[in-house]
Amino acid sequence: MFTEKANRIFQEVIKHYHIEDNPYQAFYNPYDKNTQLLEHLLYRKCWIDTVQWHYEDIIRDPKIDPVAALDLKRQIDASNQDRTDMVEYIDGYFLQQYKNVQVHDNATINTESPAWGVDRLSILALKVYHMNEEASRQDASQEHRAACQKKLEILLEQRVDLSTAIQQLLEDIAQGRKYMKVYKQMKMYNDDELNPVLRGQK
């Protein structure tokens, strides 16, 4: 199933990242986009999320240098744009895959596209990984570990539910019971024609 593959790749990415555990490390995608496009996109998507997760940790350091914080904020902004772009690439993959499906007359549209569900699943993989770290951390109190273990159990249940929902959505699309309609994000603050501050700098 698709979600089994996605969860496996997300765990692979997070494990790979934490070998060096450095958001500035070089990125390598083991999946060839010409022969394993879906795997390639999923790996890249989760890598972006994993790096940004650690950017968000760093920028919350109360002792961070203000200049470094501003530079990091811009990296986070760029990462957010990459994240959105990857969601759209993944939805493009699904649109191509299901382009010949005969849609039922009474077919309905979902509140979010499949790839935005995948986005949530990727973030959830990071929550599971790091909550498991906290639940196992030997220098933490027993109370801390117990509380984190309870949260971990909820996150694992949430992953099952979300995986099931995404898989059902894809099956509904494949059978014509639902149809895809993807709206580009059209973020305005990164566009020097749409953001009045940037436009004023031209």
Image (cartoon, helix red, strand yellow):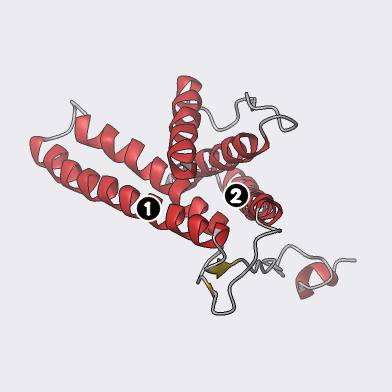
Q: Can you tell which of label 1 and label 2 is closer to the viewer?
A: 1
Front-most of 78 and 6?
Answer: 6
- Residue nearest the observer in this picture, 8 or 21: 8
Q: Residue 122's x, y, as percent?
A: 47, 45
Q: Secondary structure at mark 2?
A: helix
10 Å neighbourhood of mark 2: few (<14), some, or many (≥20)? Answer: some
Give the residue drawn at x 56%, y 57%: 174
Looking at the image, residue 31 sits to the left or right of residue 162; the answer is right
Q: CA distance from mark 1 to mark 2?
A: 30 Å
Q: Say which of 137 and 38 sits in front.
A: 38
The amino acid on which the numbered mark 1 sits, given as a three-letter code, is: Thr
Residue 139, percent from left and from top: 19, 27
- Extreme residue toward the left, this view: 142
- Residue shown at 28% from the left, 45% from the top: 156
Q: Residue pushed farthest top?
A: 19
Examine the image and state in which quarter residue 201 appears: bottom right
Q: How many marks?
A: 2
* Residue type, label 2: Ile
Numbered tag placed on residue 76 in the rendering: 2
Measured as percent of width and height from the top left, residue 4 is found at 43, 39
Where the C terminus falls, by quadrant?
bottom right
Name above or below for residue 25 compared with residue 165.
above
Residue 193 rendering spot, x and y as whole percentages: 84, 70
| Residue ID for mark 1 | 164
Report whether 127 appears left or right of 182.
left
Mark 1 vs 2, N-terminal side: 2
Residue at 70 percent across and 66 percent down: it is 184
